Image: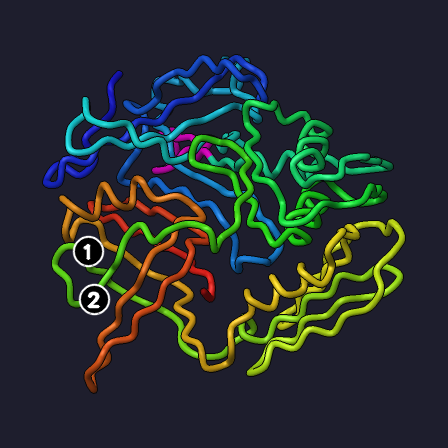
Amino acid sequence: MASQLILPLFSVYIKIEVDFTSNWNTTTPSYTDVTADVRFQDGVSWERGRDAAWDNMAPGSFSFTLSNRAGTYEPATNSDMVGSRLCRITCYYPNSGSTAYIQMVGVIDQFDIAYPVKGKDQVVAVTGVDWLTSLWLSKVVTFSTLGTSSISTYQAICNAALIPSTYQSFAAGIYTMKPAAFVATDCLSALASVANSQRQFVYVSKTGVITSTDLTSAAVSQTYDDSSSTYPFSDLKGGVGGAGTYTIVELAQSGSIQVQGGTNNTAVTANISGSPLPKTKFGPQVLQINAYPVTNPTGLVASWAAAVPSPATYWWRELEIKPLRAPATLVPAVLASELGDRITVVRHPLQGGTITKSASIRSIKHEIKGGDWTVTYGLTDR
């Protein structure tokens, strides 16, 4: 079946596919279109990203409900109904034959069979996650890497978790690393340690590729303005202050380097040597990185200091968009957006003037239900 028109007045189409036969990490999936059985009235949602740019990495997720009145998805009679099945969500606009905007490639975690209306109906609630869950489930007993670049170390970690190279795309780090080892942790935490030590943002792309990037390197792709009829937004959350404006970054080996957020971003340096075990700790106002030694620790501190805003800096934490307010411009914009993209938000306070702030997208959430569609961007502090 082709994609289904789910928002008829605005020509928004969606297609949901599941690979019921291949292994979860196949590079040549064989998808079955299940769109005709999706209960869109019960809602479809997908989200990727994290709560804060340098916070713990969390897997993306998706959910939808399938009609099972014909028993097609009954585990008792269909042996292919097991977890760890690949799933792909694709949107189309402005017609079913137009550009395919892949929105999510992930792995189904659970098929939850239910019999509502006192057994007169039968549905399957489907929930799933992205590749980061595979990394988290891969526990490390002992794992050494001789890589001296973030790319080679990222690859070694993902390979250990059986993530195919097809689903890996990593950018070069800021500084060369020294060899290190991982013990008594998991591959996701190890990956986060490497990413944070390089001041990189790691995420799973819309097409299911684990990607690393420097959040400050991208050019601004779109400007959203509360007074605009072309790219309006419906809600904006955030303000001044918060944990993001007082971030402590510590690279702790035999010595330590510390960056203290505040009005003056003061860097305190010390000698770095040895090969410690990578470990990352997070708290409400503290980001502590015990990671690889680097060949230019002073430069790494300076780059972190540049990433820490002053207390007087506005931080728009969440931007809510209703694409149906201006479908011709907003629908293609939100479907094409990706984690790490830079956007500008313009706010007009009641007392006059404007507040203009550029930031990177750290999380994206889509919720489609009851003829409405809400997209929420989580934004970095700069």
- Are circles 1 and 2 on residues that touch, CB within 8 Å? no
Q: Amino acid at mark 1?
A: Tyr
Q: Quadrant of the N terminus?
A: top left
User: Is 116 positioned to the left or the right of 208 in the image?
Assistant: left
Which of disc 2 and disc 1 is earlier in sequence? 2
Q: In the rendering, at what x and y percent does residue 382 appear?
A: 45, 65
* Residue where numbered disc 1 is placed: 231
Near-viewer residue (373 or 304): 304
- Residue 301 placement, left or right of 148: left
Task: Give, as a single range, the part of the protein colored magenta.
Answer: 113-126
* Residue at the disc numbered 2: 226
Q: What percent of the width, then of the height, locates residue 149?
A: 70, 39
Seen at 34% across and 40% down, the residue is: 44
The structure residue drawn at horizontal position 56% and vertical position 17%, both measured from the top left corner, is 26
14 over 301 or under it: above or below: above
Taking the image as drawn, is residue 110 in sight? no
The answer to whether residue 190 is visible is yes
Residue 65: quadrant of the picture? top left
Relative to 49, residue 149 above or below: above
